Amino acid sequence: MKRGLVYALLILAVFLVQNNIFAASSLVITVPNLLLILVFSFGFMRGSFEGMLIGFACGLLTDLFFGSTIGLSALIFSVLGYGIGVLGRIYYTEYVSLPLTLCLLSDLLYLLGIYVFAIVLGGGHGFVPYLTKIVLPEMLYTGLMAILLYPLFRQTEKLTRRWEEKNTRKYV
Amino acid sequence: MSEPRRSRNPRGGLLIVIGICLFLMLVSSLSPGFARVLRDGIGTVLMPMQKGMNRAGSYLSGRLEALQELRRVREDNERLEEELGQLREENAKLKLNEQELDAMRELLHLQEQYREYESMGAHVIGRSSGNWYQSFLIDKGSKDGLEAGMNVMAGGGLVGLVTSVGNNTSTVSTIINTGRYVSAMTTRSGHSFLVAGSLELYADGMLALENIPLGADVEPGDMVVTSNISDVFLPGLLIGYVEETVTDANRLLRSGSLRPVADFDNLDMVLVITTLKGTGETP
């Protein structure tokens, strides 16, 4: 319950920051994919199930406001959240370099997923410009932001767990 | 109570979530009404927050810009004074040209059409999160009489198209989107061709020109407006000016680039034309 509340607030905050805070400044510049960092971080720390749920919520929110087909980003984000959760079970969560690599990899997968769907839905075009103009810049920015945000999300996770445990102890 | 990795059945959950997503995709592409209801609900709740965040962002970026601007202003001032002299000279020449232009506009009935279109101002309050689809959110919706398919202008140039409408917000898909084609023509010669969003060009603030007939009289500097052929864009809306043209490798057509009038880098206020193509314009 408390955890759900924390997640809802986090998702909302990240969504608003990403989509609204610098909305008026520019449409052309590359923005880091903050929602993906959120999905990735919690999927990695908390496992498949929660990664998938957060992914679904983030994707759905994006779709409702900006997507042409509701459910497309939700699908990609939930599958990514799930996959990251599976990897998180195998690897130890303390090191940052590995999560970072995974985050970049998931951004790449996300962008490739969007590309494949765009072709399926009939809006395909050159792959090389897509790679150089969108994929590489976005991965760079997302990677940089992940270095800053991942520790922040880890801290949030710790605080949330402490908050949860405070109440459960009363019943022991 | 809450272990990090719960022993719920995550694989079953994944299948359910995928199912929900596919269902949503199917339903929303089959019935626009369903998507509308969902968008309205979430839009009504989030709109005040989005507006607030947007204001905060504008304030921050405004502060940052003010600092950078001081330095720029000094350099600009010098350059501008030089330009002023040149412009005065050009202005005299252009006044002569204007009379010629008026005559041509009349020929195309552009002027009358522009006047017939009714429009409404709106603030940009959000942008799409991906770097792929260039669309943005405005603070007017069906309550203000907006409908999907309405054309959107900024700074005198075409920006895009309203693609979905909520109660208080609407999403605008821009013409710099790859895969979005606008049929257009030059005001000078009336030859028609396509204006398209292009990944290679938009970083430089340009759009692509495609399918220009080989013999067509299309030169750099020509004014490009939307043509009558388009089924979604009203005719006669200014898009931009031809930057350059080159003959395609197959030597059958020409392509090129176009500098749009609308400043996609700095969208703040836009104008939504509430006249819809196919309903409003009876000459």
Image: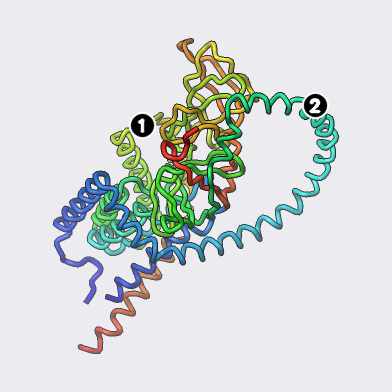
The quarter of the picture where residue A110 lies is: top left
Residue B37 % position (x, y): 30, 57
Q: Nearer the viewer, residue B231 or A94?
A: B231
The quarter of the picture where residue A111 lies is: top left
Which residue: 76% across, 28% down? B94
Label 2 crowding class (10 Å Cα cut-off): few <14, some 14-19, many 20+? few
Q: Which residue is mark 1?
A: A124
Tell me, yes or no, whether dots 2 and 1 are on the same chain.
no
Which residue: 48% across, 54% down? B138
Residue B98 drawn above or below residue A70 = above
Specify the amino acid type for callout 1.
Gly
Q: Nearer the viewer, residue B72 or A98?
A: B72
Tags 2 and 1 touching, CB below 8 Å = no
Q: Is residue A143 visible?
A: no
The single residue placed furthest to the front in the displayed view is: B283
SS of the residue under disc 2? helix
Q: Is residue A38 visible?
A: yes
Is B145 left, or right, of B99 in this rendering? left
Q: Nearer the viewer, residue A89 or B208?
A: B208
Please identify the quadrant where the C terminus of chain A is shown. Answer: bottom left
Q: Which residue is mark 2?
A: B93
- Marks 2, 1: nearer the viewer: 2
Q: Chain of mark 1?
A: A
Q: For residue A147, which numbered disc appears in the image?
A: none
SS of the residue under disc 1? loop
Which residue: 27% across, 75% down? A1
Which residue: 41% across, 61% down? A150
Label 1 crowding class (10 Å Cα cut-off): few <14, some 14-19, many 20+? some
Q: CA distance from mark 2 to mark 1?
A: 46 Å
Specify the amino acid type for callout 2.
Lys
Residue B9 % position (x, y): 14, 61
